[in-house]
Image (cartoon, grey):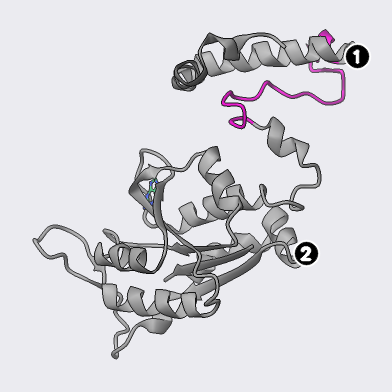
Amino acid sequence: MRIDVVTIFPGYLGPLDEALVGRARRAGLIDLHVHDLRAWATGVHKAVDDSPYGGGPGMVMVPTVWGEALDAVRAESPDEPGLLLVPTPAGAPLTQARAAAWAGEPRLVLACGRYEGIDARVTADAARHGRVEEFSLGDYVLAGGEVAALVAVEAVSRLVPGVLGNPESAELDSFSDGLLEAPAFTRPESWRDLDVPGVLRGGDHGAVARWRRDRSLERTAAVRPDLLDGLLAAHGAAVFDRH
Ligand code: 6GU
């Protein structure tokens, strides 16, 4: 899969050299390109932003620079214009389902805005060339889209075949069945007077699965009751049946 990220702070994407994503890149599974938006800025000041029409605080990123940048990045791989992803607190939430859908794309292009966002005509124009999706990490405001791009690249990369050592771990994750994961334990069996639950040491795989399911439901009901409401609405009470 090819991923392009366009940003005025390429250094922000440095962590993508590390750990899981770094390894996936070196293995040739993820072909990641980070582009400095300022390369397409013109004039002595290389400005990328201007004051908003209609007034108000802050600055808006200019469509001219973004248009040239996205045209050029798209042209680097003309057969595959890619899905344009725009991080913005005004987008629909990033979910595991969206990450999984994006992991099936041959190419993603991430356009990171700063300031009060990007002139709205940039996404309108991009939608004439291909598909565009805006996404938000949640209900809080970041200084720019770079951290959201890091989050999206990591969430997507671990779902690309071959990136995870054990593909089962993606399937067992929190959210892949719509519930939060049960707590996990490893050796030693007893630590600071805290014991690993006996059922996990007993070798009864059915009992372990039921215990994990119960803890998942308990934890989800406690911290994310909205997820249970969503599952009930989608599938009915059968989703809570024991297997
Ligand atoms: Cl995607 N961008 C910004 N700037 N702030 C956010 C966000 C994205 N998601 C939550 N807050």
At label 2, the amino acid type is: Ala
Q: Which residue is mark 1?
A: 203
Identified at 16% across, 65% down, the residue is: 52
Res 232 seen here? yes
Identified at 78% across, 23% down, the residue is: 185
Q: What x and y, as percent, mark residue 164?
A: 75, 47
Q: Is residue 22 left or right of residue 196?
A: left
Q: Which mark is residue 30?
A: none
Q: Secondary structure at mark 1?
A: loop
Task: List the single residue furthest toward the right.
Answer: 203
Q: Which residue is mark 2?
A: 27
At label 1, the amino acid type is: Gly
Res 195 seen here? no
What segment carries the magenta color?
174-200
- Quarter of the N terminus within the rendering: bottom right
In the picture, residue 61 is in which quadrant? Answer: bottom left
Q: Is residue 212 left or right of residue 44?
A: right
Task: List the single residue furthest toward the bottom.
Answer: 44
